[in-house]
Amino acid sequence: MSHSFSIFPLEKLSSHVEITSGFTFKSEQFVDDSTQIPLVKGENVQQGYIDWGVSKYWRADDYNNLEKYHLVTGDIVLAMDRPWVTAGLKWAHIKKHDPKSLLVQRVARLRAKNKLNQDYLRFLISSNYFSGYVQPIVTGVNIPHISGKQIGDFKIPLPSLESQKKIAAILSAYDDLIENNKRRIALLENMAEEIYREWFVRFRFPNYKNAEFEKGIPKGWELVTLDKAFKCLGGGTPSKESNAYWKEGDINWYTPSDITGAEGFFLSSSKDKCNEEGLARSSAKMFPAYSIMMTSRATIGAIGINTTPACTNQGFITCIPNKKYPLTYLYYWFKLSKSHFVMLSGGATFPELSKTTFKRIEILTPSHEIIDEFDKIVKPIFEQIEKLLAMNENLKESKNSLLPRLISGKLTVENLNIQFPPSMEM
């Protein structure tokens, strides 16, 4: 991605940023105790956030001796090994609510200096302008990597410090709206899940006190094997060696990374798209919108719901909801059954849940009346979640289209009177 920077001077990143790599932590010195200090390694750094759930830990009593490698609010971290994944560049920044942590080798920490604003730097690093610079310079076959020098050689557009702050404030406003929507989505999903647990796990559904139970479940409910409950489909991959199968493709073709890299469970578009010829010449099968796509290889039990007709690769089992098993009910049944799916998975090279094994699983099947009542309550919640996710996608697109105009100087901010958002108050 190229831009014209005729207004702002271009200067090396290293002239305005302190670029630090972490030190070598010996794995035998890690502690298996989440009350200690988490280490930020390459595997922690995802696209725009840190996954604390995969952290290793270091002794808290040694923390003060390692001040050079402390991570504080506002710090930007960038994976130097395997910096590029399917979803994009592996970078993140430390937020106020993140735990105090330590930087590990092969992860770069970026701190602004010399007339460079840290928030402005964050938006530069998150931009297509920077990721477009990194992708072609990654080297190494076994472990693709970039160096600290390569990071430092990146040329940054450098407006005045005041303009940098204003640019960051405009872009932060988009981030604040997105984060607010994410919180609303989490609340809505938790609300719907709690209703599911209350009705179908604890069996405290409407009028439950008058219900009779047989073999541990309400009378009139039953356990049905999945092969008799709803239709299940596998997937396939049109040959990647034939460009003819992908040229001008407009059919959503999902891979597990589309699911694991998504910010919500409704997905409107896949990264790769095949065409009609590719679909016809593969074992991939089209299924209707609002089906349940579940990963069944390597990563077991990750779930996505397609909002348009789609197909998947062979790493999925896709299930088609019906009147007896509506989408709202199936989604939470799948979500809460993940550990069971993992337990049933086999495979020498990587875990896999076969379709044969899957179809033998039994699903709790409540009465029509209870299912219908649940669906009437939860369906509007799902619709609201889908709208908020779509709103966030639009906000991201607007922000991404605005960013190059701001950092190139094509859209001036010098005369704007801008109030800085709470997220920029350190």
Image (cartoon, grey):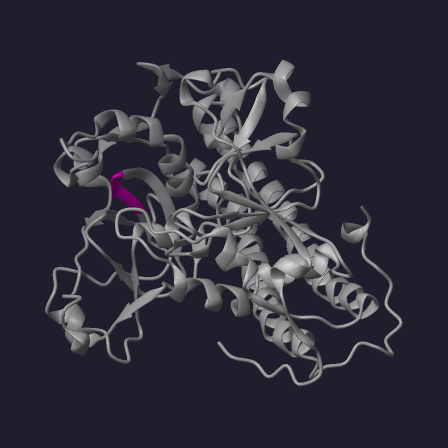
Number of dots carrying numbers = 0
In x, y percent, where is residue 157? 66, 72
Looking at the image, which is closer to me, 220 or 72? 72
Q: Is residue 71 left or right of residue 343?
A: right
Q: Is 92 left, or right, of 140 in this rendering?
A: right
Residue 209 is situated, as x and y percent measured from the top left of the image, at 52, 18
Residue occupying image coordinates x 35% and y 30%: 337
- Placement of 73 over or under 314, stated as above or below: above
**Image quadrant in which you'd find residue 342:** top left
> Can the viewer see residue 263?
no
Out of 55 and 76, give the one closest to the viewer: 76
First to last magenta residue range? 294-298
**Location of residue 333 (image quadrant):** top left
Classify 139 as above or below 164. Answer: above
Magenta residues, dominant SS class:
strand
In this rendering, does residue 416 appear at all? yes
Residue 139 image offset from top left, x and y in percent = 34, 57
Q: Position of residue 70 (x, y in %)?
A: 65, 33
Q: Is residue 386 magenta?
A: no
Query: Residue 328 lies in what quarter of the image?
Result: top left
Residue drawn 61% across the image and 49% down it? 182
Which residue is painted at 65% across and 78% down in the image? 408
Establish if 92 lies above or below 411: above
Along the line of sight, the residue nearer the viewer: 266 or 207: 266
Depth check: 63 or 398 in front?
A: 63
